Amino acid sequence: MGEPTGRKHIPGQGEDDIKIKEKMSRIKHKIIVISGKGGVGKSTVATNLAFDLAQKNLSVGLLDVDIHGPSIGRMSGIEGLRLNLNPDETIEPIQKNGVKIVTMASLLQDTDQPVIWRGPLKMKAIKQFLGDINWGELDWLVIDSPPGTGDEPLSVIQLIENLDGSIIVSTPQEVALLDARKTIRFSQALGVKVLGIIENMSGFICEYCGKQTDIFKTGGAEKVAQELKLPYLGKLPLERTIMESGELGKPYVTLFPKSKSAEEMRNITSNLLNVIDKV
């Protein structure tokens, strides 16, 4: 199978494309958070990044394009809430702590219901998320994608003409970094700037003694960033507060603002803002 080269957009200017272009033109920065494999904490990173941006008095949207396994609803505390249809047939996102949120989970009647769709239906859903949602004027739209380099991230990249770039999330061990490298190449092959790499689960911090244990090693993502001359945005530790906040549906940057994770996320957000200023 051949490798895609260059930033290729879906041909033609149909009604859907025009709506997407109009909606996206009102959003200053649009980024996609991707990872090479599942289980690296990408959705947790995307959620806390969005909420931390909002804490900096920025207007923020959070879009979950993981059609088959959406988790943003639970992590952001909007699980069970439904999207509302406006009189003009646009859809109103759900708002939480100043963040406008859209996820497939808000369209399902039952959270245990599987979404058994092929590519064309997933593309149609993503088009609606981008073109039919009343995002309004935003400073940032953070898009959380499922792991890998398949339909969902490819659709987002094809549909948003002026995407600012991608953020790559990886854990420190070599097997995860191998897949992260593929994700970096995927982004670059499609002409999408890699805004930075984040190392997640970078050392476990004991809540009792404060000692750090490098369960998955540490520093691997920073090394890859240096090798490929890409921005390194920072690293996030393993802490019990991360699990607890996710289960409670409250991002740790708001629930545990004094935790090490929250401190590091604030550093990552600041680094991202610095990178964007230089783009």
Image (cartoon, grey):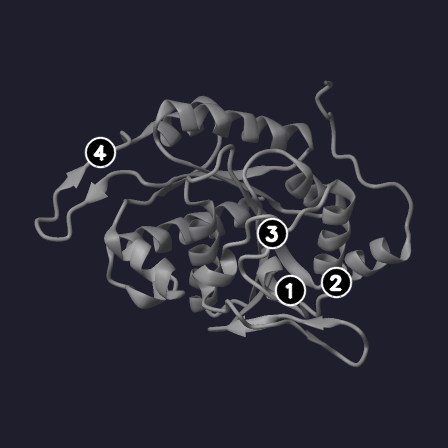
Q: CA distance from mark 3 to mark 4?
A: 36 Å
Circle 4 SS class: loop
Q: Amino acid at mark 3?
A: Pro
Question: Which residue is the site of mark 2?
Answer: 23
Q: Earlier in the sequence, mark 1 or mark 4?
A: 1
Question: Which residue is the site of mark 4?
Answer: 214
Can residue 160 be seen here? The reply is no
Q: Nearer the viewer, mark 1 or mark 3?
A: 3
Q: Earlier in the sequence, mark 2 or mark 4?
A: 2
Q: CA distance from mark 1 to mark 3?
A: 12 Å
Question: Which residue is the site of mark 3?
Answer: 114
Q: Which mark is residue 107?
A: 1
Q: CA distance from mark 1 to mark 4?
A: 39 Å
In the picture, the quarter occupied by the N terminus is top right
Can residue 113 be seen here? The reply is yes
Whether residue 209 sits left or right of residue 51 in the image: it is left
Whether residue 58 sits left or right of residue 116 in the image: it is left
Residue at 73 percent across and 54 percent down: it is: 125
In the picture, the quarter occupied by the C terminus is top right
Q: Is residue 4 above or below residue 253?
A: above
Q: CA distance from mark 2 to mark 4?
A: 44 Å
Q: Earlier in the sequence, mark 2 or mark 3?
A: 2
Q: Nearer the viewer, mark 3 or mark 4?
A: 3
Q: Amino acid at mark 1?
A: Leu
Q: Position of residue 154 (x, y in %)?
A: 69, 39
Q: Amino acid at mark 4?
A: Asp
